[in-house]
Image: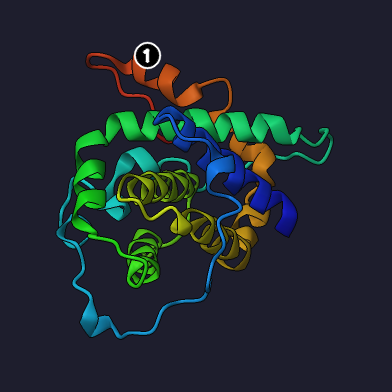
Amino acid sequence: MSQSNRELVVDFLSYKLSQKGYSWSQFSDVEENRTEAPEGTESDMETPSAINGNPSWHLADSPAVNGATGHSRSLDAREVIPMAAVKQALREAGDEFELRYRRAFSDLTSQLHITPGTAYQSFEQVVNELFRDGVNWGRIVAFFSFGGALCVESVDKEMQVLVSRIATWMATYLNDHLEPWIQENGGWDTFVELYGNNAAAESRKGQEPTATHTSQGWA
């Protein structure tokens, strides 16, 4: 599963970079001096206000990303959904997430003030805050979106070397911390059932202007 998770990360980051006119191939082979966490202590970093008490991006309290929790279906008699379908569902869900939280999401990335020496700490802080109250599909989408935004921010600030590092950090976190929950909740097949075919966007359209719809986990 490690390789497939890495494949999902690379595909999503490639997609997000391409939306800004960048190509993954420009950065994937950039030589790195190290990929582990840089030296430093937490006292060297301040937690960005966008993840520390700002309700507009405090995902633990957001119904739009909490709703898929507890939604389970039996997939025993079903074929495994192709990886291409998972990639597409992630892309679409990421786009929808960023559309709904564009302003707060932009505030978050702009407040991180990343450098090659502090990027891992910034990544770790945000991700730990994101999953502080547990894992659900919506927060996994937010995790991918944050990684994509961090890559774009790195390239915009001429820190291309960080792109492949971020991909490694994401794949490692996905494998070590999120994979058990994913498997316990139906695997990526369930994610595609919930978010495939641009389901999140269709759900939003269906609830405009006053209707409330929760089946896709987006409020």
Say left or right for 150 vs 8: left
Inspect the image, locate mark 1, and give the three-letter code of the amino acid beneath it: Gly
Dot 1 surroundings within 10 Å: few (below 14), some, or many (20 or more)? few
Q: In the image shown, does 205 or 213 lie closer to the viewer?
A: 205
Closest to the observer: 18 or 159?
159
Residue positioned 23% across, 75% down in the render = 45
Vertical placement of 58 versus 203: above or below? below
Q: Quadrant of residue 123?
A: bottom left
**Above or below, 202 relative to 137:** above
Q: Depth check: 59 or 207 in front?
A: 59
Residue that appears at 52% across and 33% down: 15
Q: Which residue is mark 1?
A: 206
Q: Position of residue 83 (x, y in %)?
A: 72, 36
Task: Determine whether, in the image, residue 51 is placed left or right of residue 77.
Answer: left
Q: Quadrant of the C terminus?
A: top left
Residue 71 in sight here: no
Camera sees residue 171: yes
User: Residue at 33% of width from left, 47% of height from top?
Assistant: 153
Of 86 and 218, the residue lying toward us: 86
Q: Is residue 54 left or right of residue 179?
A: left
| Quarter of the N terminus within the rendering | bottom right
Here the colouring is rainbow
Mark count? 1
Residue at the spot 34% in from the left edge and 38% down from the top edge: 64
Secondary element at image label 1 = helix
The quarter of the displayed image where residue 213 is located? top left
At which x and y percent is residue 47? Answer: 21, 68
Q: Looking at the image, is 166 positioned above or below residue 214? A: below
x, y percentage for residue 73?
A: 66, 39
